[in-house]
Amino acid sequence: MRAALLAPDHAHQGGLAALLAAGGRVTDDPAEAEGSDLVLDGIVGIGGRGPLRDAALPWVAAAERGAATVVAVDLPSGVDPDTGAVPGAAVRADVTVTFGTYKPGLLVDPGASYAGVVRLVDIGLGEVRGGVRGAPLDGHVLEALQQEDVAALLPEPDAESDKYRRGVVGVAAGSARYPGAAVLAVGAALHGGVGAVRYAGAAAREVVRAHPEALVGEGGPKDAGRVQAWVVGPGLSQDAEAERAVEEALDAGVPVLVDADGLRLLARRAAAPANALLTPHAGEAVALLAGLGVSATREQVEAERLRHARELARGYGCTVLLKGSTTVVAAPTGPVRVNATGTSQLATAGSGDVLSGLAGALLAAGLDPLDAGSVAAYLHGLAGRLSSDGAPTTAGAVTAALPDAWRRSAE
């Protein structure tokens, strides 16, 4: 065994003596890492912040070039433990062995993509909550729902249920140019645990043709009838009629999910009801932040998902589901959740419309915005995996896989 001492004055003398006594040696040649079978990364620990120092960079590059299995200790060096940001070069691990608690940087991209398979070693810090130990974030907790958590939250009809008691979700989506967004959102909502779906908008004919179960009308949310939650925005466009639909949904006094075009219209008023759930991707998050007077780029949002999701939640006073390679769900206070079921195959047209319809239905079924967003992200990710099975998928196939995802989660 060979040890690279990047800071010899700070080496643990007892550990170094044990290494030498066992026949190990110290090296300063990065080529030895490149030619090794196993590399243990312990350059910095959870106290490390900012880019790695220059002395570490040749070793990181050598490990990347070589064929060794790389095991990171606690987290890959170069990954910010609290945010998942990677401000410079970082170790790409095959396995990360972390101690006591999962660190946020292991669960959120870009850091999560450097961690490989993560294994938690219990060192007696307390009970596991939701499969993930509480990890600090701005004085709060980072959570990832596990299957048993989702099962406990899924709405189930009882003997006294009828279609209205189960909840009715309204969908104001689609336009003459983008009728498919309405069709996808309604289709997903029908699989979301509610008793009925009302559609209001310009794509009524396309919706009822695809989903005869839906209750359709060509007016706006104000004229649609009673619902327990609204979904507004997917494919809506940004004209005066779309703006009116967003305003009517926001003023309906029920929980409201705002997505896509609705988010850009919402940014103009820079406020939302406390029972709203906003579902931006990084580009839409930039527009929402601009509505708050905050300048950011898409790349900055993607690099620090936790911080920007929380900033949006606090700024708009509601729950925010920030979509992306790691989906983050944040309320203004309390735990922030990340989703563990996502797949890159969900990066396909209409996938966000499916998520919106599903989450809106869960809102109408009685889940609060944080739970509705978290459960929807979990089911959406699982349905993406089931519909893909290693091959490209489509939004329609994801919708078709939702019942299977629900059944597996409810077991």
Image: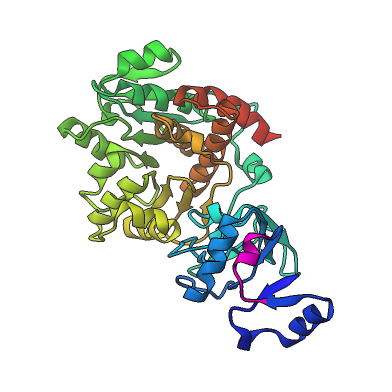
Specify whether 12 is left or right of 380: right
Specify whether 102 is left or right of 224: right
Residue 87 image position (x, y, % from top left): 43, 65
Residue 25 image position (x, y, % from top left): 74, 77
Residue 137 image position (x, y, % from top left): 51, 66
Quarter where residue 405 is shown: top right
At 38% from the left and 13% from the top, the residue drawn is 208
Between 403 and 32, the residue placed more toward the observer is 32
Asked if residue 147 can be seen in this view, the reply is yes
Its colouring scheme is: rainbow
Specify whether 246 is left or right of 94: left
* Image mark count: 0
Residue 184 image position (x, y, % from top left): 41, 24
Quarter where residue 68 is shown: bottom right
The region drawn magenta spans 27-35
Quarter where residue 290 is shown: bottom left
Relative vertical location of residue 406 with respect to residue 374 in this rendering, above or below: above
Residue 330 is covered by the magenta coloring: no
Furthest-right residue in this view: 22
Between 151 and 390, the residue placed more toward the observer is 390
Asked if residue 317 can be seen in this view, the reply is no
Relative vertical location of residue 9 with respect to residue 130 in this rendering, above or below: below
At 35% from the left and 18% from the top, the residue drawn is 216
- Image quadrant for the C terminus? top right
- Image quadrant for the N terminus? bottom right
